[in-house]
Amino acid sequence: MDIIVCIKRVPQTAEAEVSIDSTGKSIQKDRLTFDMNESDTYALEEAVLLKEKFEGNITVLSLGYPDTDDTLRIALAKGADNAIRIKAENFENPDAFQTAQILKSVIKTINFDIILTGCIATDDAYSQIGVTLAELLEIPHAALVIKVDANEQRTHVHRELEEGLIEHLDIKLPALLTILTGINEPRYASLIAIRRAAKKEIQQLGKENIELEDLVINSVIEELYVPPVTKQVEILTGSPSETATKLAGIVKEKGLI
């Protein structure tokens, strides 16, 4: 089974202080650490599990800058066989649709049975790349997948819907699945595997190597800003009688009684 996994290198912002840069269209990244996008790590693990079951080949693919090579090497250390970096420096701030177009131009030259992506990127939260890529490639897809049971011709998948509902799909291959976090337990790369991955070649593709159709611009970031404070929460402290008195005063002040 031939599998392609699309991954992204993203800044880790969960426990970091984030501020907007001078352009007003991005965040300051010079003091942030970067790693593989969280749901992409689950997509990669799912690919490795499929490879262990059916054998085959895993190709990891990323549109990124030179430092993305570090993320690709971690993917190689975890079980991927080949890595390709599409040079992001050749493209000017592609939006989600353009990114999918660029990925398609490379993927169409590779044999594959399944394409796996993360369900969402933690830096922009668009959730567009996987489903858009499937439409451009004209293959079936399923999003927010929480279980994969594949064979050589088809795959049974379970995907999460709203309100706790689960949808069961039977999909003919080739197909694309966007993977939800929690579907498996991603493995750690061993030190030996990391050292081996450091010696592997990462294929570099620039504009000159890609048969690219005219990129369609659908969206442009106009401004990034911190939401203004419109409502505030006031926590009342003191004894029950004191807080009751304060609350009564607030209710009366607001004209609610």
Image (tube, rainbow, N blue to C red):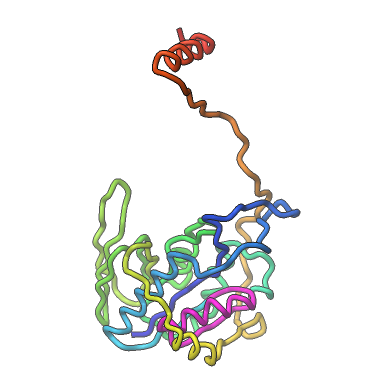
Q: Residue furthest top?
A: 257
Tell me where residue 184 sits by quadrant.
Answer: bottom left
Q: Residue at x 58, y 55 (%)?
A: 16
Residue 65 on the magenta span: yes
Tell me where residue 144 sits by quadrant.
Answer: bottom left
Residue situated in front as seen by the camera: 204 or 192: 192
Residue situated in front as seen by the camera: 42 or 205: 42
Which percent across, then down, holds residue 52? 30, 84
Can you say which quadrant of the picture contains the N terminus?
bottom left
Locate residue 25 relative to residue 63 in the image: left or right: right
Locate residue 118 relative to residue 11 in the image: left or right: left
Q: Residue at x 62, y 53 (%)?
A: 18
Q: Residue at x 49, y 64 (%)?
A: 129
Q: Residue furthest front?
A: 239
Locate residue 124 relative to residue 152 in the image: left or right: right
Can you say which quadrant of the picture contains the C terminus?
top left
The relative height of residue 70 versus residue 14 in the rendered view (above or below) is below
Residue 64 on the magenta span: yes
Tell me where residue 138 sits by quadrant.
Answer: bottom left
The relative height of residue 247 versus residue 220 in the rendered view (above or below) is above
In the image, the segment drawn in magenta is 62-87
Which percent across, then down, holds residue 45? 37, 74
Q: Residue at x 69, y 67 (%)?
A: 92
Q: Residue furthest right?
A: 22
The relative height of residue 100 versus residue 196 in the rendered view (above or below) is above
Which percent across, then down, holds residue 175? 36, 73
